[in-house]
């Protein structure tokens, strides 16, 4: 299994891109990509690579998920870049 998604999040309109070729480029219609969410265990190096890849693209918000120990849930924290 590559990914799972909690059933209560099914209302989210998201797309997941998984590929083996790190050099693969993706293009999207302006305004179609509004935000990127990094998992709680995403490395700073990987996050930095994505920030560099989307530099100059307007209106993309970046978030990193963080574990909430009290509820075992997740919280998105906006990244500043």
Image: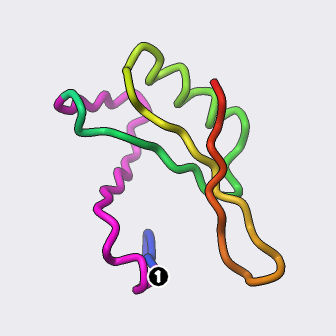
Q: Quadrant of the N terminus?
A: bottom left
From the viewer's perspective, is 50 left or right of 78? left
Residues rendered magenta in the picture = 6-29
Near mark 1 (Cα within 10 A), the count class, few <14, some 14-19 or many ≥20, is: few
Residue 17 highlighted magenta (yes or no): yes
Of the pair 1 and 16, the residue shown nearer to us: 16
Query: In the rendering, at what x and y percent does residue 81 appear?
Result: 63, 24
Examine the structure image and report whether residue 13 is included in the region drawn in magenta. yes
Quick one: which residue is furthest to the left in this view? 29
For this view, does 69 lie left or right of residue 39? right
Instruction: Determine which quarter of the picture holds residue 47.
Output: top right
Instruction: Give the image location of residue 16, x and y in percent.
Output: 35, 56
Percent of width and height locating residue 36: 46, 44
- State left or right for residue 68 relative to residue 76: right
Q: Along the line of sight, which residue is nearer the eye, 41 or 73?
A: 73
Residue in the image at 31% along x and 39% along y: 33
| Nearest to the observer: residue 22 or residue 77 | 77
- The residue labelled by disc 1 is 6
Residue at position x 17%, y 31% from top?
29
Which quadrant of the view contains residue 40?
bottom right
Which x, y percent locates residue 7?
A: 40, 86
Q: Residue at x 53, y 19 (%)?
A: 52
| Vertical arrangement, residue 5 with respect to residue 79, above or below | below
Q: How many marks?
A: 1
Relative to 66, residue 30 above or below: above
Main secondary structure of the magenta stretch: loop
């Amino acid at each position: 299994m590559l990914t799972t998604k909690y059933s209560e999040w099914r209302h989210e309109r998201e797309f997941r891109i998984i590929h083996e070729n790190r050099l693969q480029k993706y293009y999207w219609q302006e305004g179609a990509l509004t935000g990127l969410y990094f998992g709680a265990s995403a490395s700073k190096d990987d996050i930095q690579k994505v920030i560099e890849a989307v530099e100059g693209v307007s209106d993309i918000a970046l978030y990193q998920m963080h574990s909430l120990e009290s509820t075992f849930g997740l919280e998105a924290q906006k990244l500043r870049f």
